[in-house]
Image: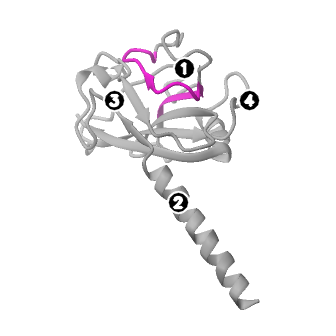
């Protein structure tokens, strides 16, 4: 009995280790944003006192975990002085066979996103990419780009849903995630 429990425990631990190793290979990158670097004027919002180009960056990923049926992408600033952070971009229902998002694809209409993708409303009040625009004098804010591998082909999201509701649905279906952080201050 003890031997059976021990073998079961060892098997479970090995399975969890193998899953974490496979998920550890899952990577998100951008040719225009290096992890830990400062965002360029291309990824800065144009409005709210900011004068950037508001262009979503090119993003690419590799080594999706087994069982991935779709992806979701979030860009979040936890340092925004709102008490709840700031959602800069939410994309979901990205097909499992996609492995990149082109630069500039984060327009309101999302026509350059992988076919079938949908965008949620950001904290700017609309869909599409909203670049960095922290308050003047704040320390540089963190912008966390996260790609979520999901266990479902499609998230059933009501039109006009908040980023928080979409985040809930992402978390309920997530297999793995990969992210990098960039900074911006003014």
Closest to the camera, between mark 2 and mark 3, is 2
Q: What is the CA distance from the residue labelled 2 to the residue labelled 3?
A: 40 Å
Q: Which numbered disc, 3 or 4, marks the residue that appears first in the sequence? A: 3
Q: What element does badge 3 sit on?
A: loop
Q: Residues within 10 Å of mark 1 (few under 14, many from 20)?
A: many
Comparing 56 with 66, the one in front is: 66
| The C terminus lies in quadrant | top left
Quadrant assignment, res 91? top right
Q: Which residue is mark 2?
A: 18
The question of residue 124 being in magenta is answered with no
Residue shown at 34%/30% (left/top)? 132
Q: Which numbered disc, 3 or 1, marks the residue that appears first in the sequence? A: 1
Q: With respect to residue 134, does 177 lie above or below?
A: below
Q: What element does badge 4 sit on?
A: loop
Coordinates of residue 154 in the picture (x, y in percent): 69, 29
Q: Which numbered disc, 1 or 2, marks the residue that appears first in the sequence? A: 2
Q: Residues within 10 Å of mark 4 (few under 14, many from 20)?
A: few
Coordinates of residue 126 in the picture (x, y in percent): 54, 20
Q: Which residue is mark 1?
A: 127
Comparing 11 with 111, the one in front is: 11
Q: What is the CA distance from the residue labelled 1 to the residue labelled 2?
A: 38 Å
């Amino acid at each position: 009995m003890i031997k059976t429990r021990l073998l079961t425990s060892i098997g479970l631990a090995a399975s969890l280790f193998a899953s974490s190793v496979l998920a550890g290979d899952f990577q998100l990158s951008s040719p225009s944003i290096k992890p830990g670097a400062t965002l360029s004027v291309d990824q800065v919002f144009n409005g709210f006192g900011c004068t950037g180009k508001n262009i979503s960056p090119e993003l690419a990923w590799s080594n999706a975990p087994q069982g991935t049926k779709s992806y979701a992408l979030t860009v979040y600033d936890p340092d925004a002085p709102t008490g709840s952070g700031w959602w800069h971009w939410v994309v979901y229902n990205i097909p499992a066979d996609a492995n990149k998002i082109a630069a500039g694809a984060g327009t309101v209409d999302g026509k350059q996103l992988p076919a079938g993708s949908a965008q949620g409303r950001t904290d700017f009040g609309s869909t599409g990419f909203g670049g960095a625009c922290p308050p003047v004098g704040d320390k540089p804010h963190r912008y966390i780009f996260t790609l979520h591998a999901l266990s479902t082909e499609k998230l059933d999201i009501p039109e006009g849903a908040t980023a928080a509701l979409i985040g809930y649905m992402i978390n309920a279906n997530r297999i793995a995630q990969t992210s990098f952080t960039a900074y911006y201050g003014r």
